[in-house]
Image (spheres, grey):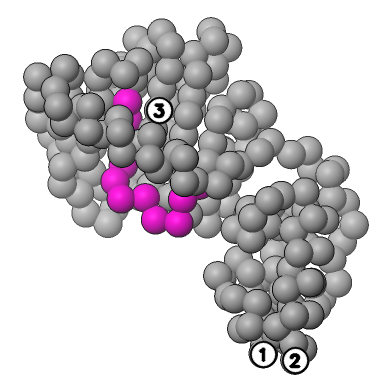
Amino acid sequence: MLRIVHGAECIGSVAHRLQRDATRVVRGVVKPPYVATDSLDALECHKLSEGVDYQVLYDRSALSHRSQLDRTSRMLDLGEQARVVHLAPVKLLLVDDEIGLLPLTSTSQTLESAVLLRGSTMLSAMSSVFDDLWRLAAPLCANREDDATDVPSEEERWILSLLAAGATDEAIGRHMGFSSRTAHRRVRELIWRLGVQTRFQAGVRAVKLGWL
């Protein structure tokens, strides 16, 4: 079954209803543009407390906003499983592997229409897309704010800012005036110090700690 939903308000209402009725697992891909999230955040907190699993893939751009990063950190503390991909191909909501919500048309600011999927080959295809993205994505972990309390030096802040911007070790070395080998070592030291596994996670963690 396919049904078209028009308008951001209606799309948000449908997303809320689908998650409200979830009994096992909610899987989603988060990227701009967004619908109103306050009620969805409260609902996710409630469903997590009921034992419903949440698996959420975040587009890298989504976590560049401090408000979204703070929201994600709260949900991680409550039990959300989250991973990040460099570029998510599409927004998506899947509930209990039985029903899905997929945007159809949008502007840079809002969703205009979406399709409700139930019992269709398109739903199966979207589920497979999510599984493939999940396997390739980098995990985000809940970390306490006191895990890395030592303040970085000004030089380390510059390295982190270049790292968060996606610069390579070679580019960091050129900018900072040392070799790419030294840049690689300094980057690995910062990743270890921040308690994360990837370069992108280091940038996210540094923003969360107020280092950038």
The amino acid sitting under disc 2 is: Gly
Q: CA distance from mark 2 to mark 3?
A: 44 Å
Residue beneath disc 3: 27
Residue beneath disc 2: 177
Taking the magenta stretch, the answer to whether it contains residue 10 is no
Mark number displayed over residue 212: none
- Answer left or right for 172 relative to 136: right
- Answer left or right for 104 relative to 42: left
The amino acid sitting under disc 1 is: Arg
Q: Look at 9% across and 19% down and name the residue there.
A: 1
Q: Look at 50% across and 19% down and name the residue there.
A: 53
Choose the circle earlier in sequence order: 2 or 3.
Answer: 3
**Quick one: label 3, few (<14), some, or many (20+) residues within 10 Å?**
many
Q: Where are the magenta residues, as a range?
A: 84-94
Q: CA distance from mark 1 to mark 3?
A: 41 Å
Residue situated in front as seen by the camera: 120 or 207 = 120
Residue situated in front as seen by the camera: 183 or 31 = 183
- Answer left or right for 52 relative to 142: left
Q: Quadrant of residue 175?
A: bottom right
Where residue 88 sits: x, y (%)? 37, 50
The amino acid sitting under disc 3 is: Arg
Q: Look at 32% across and 26% down and name the residue there.
A: 94
Q: Can residue 193 be seen here? A: yes
Q: Quadrant of residue 45?
A: top right
Q: Look at 70% across and 83% down and name the residue there.
A: 180
**Quick one: label 2, few (<14), some, or many (20+) residues within 10 Å?**
few
Q: CA distance from mark 1 to mark 2?
A: 5 Å
**Quick one: label 1, few (<14), some, or many (20+) residues within 10 Å?**
few
Q: Can residue 7 be seen here? A: no
Q: Is residue 140 above or below residue 199?
A: above
Taking the magenta stretch, the answer to whether it contains residue 93 is yes
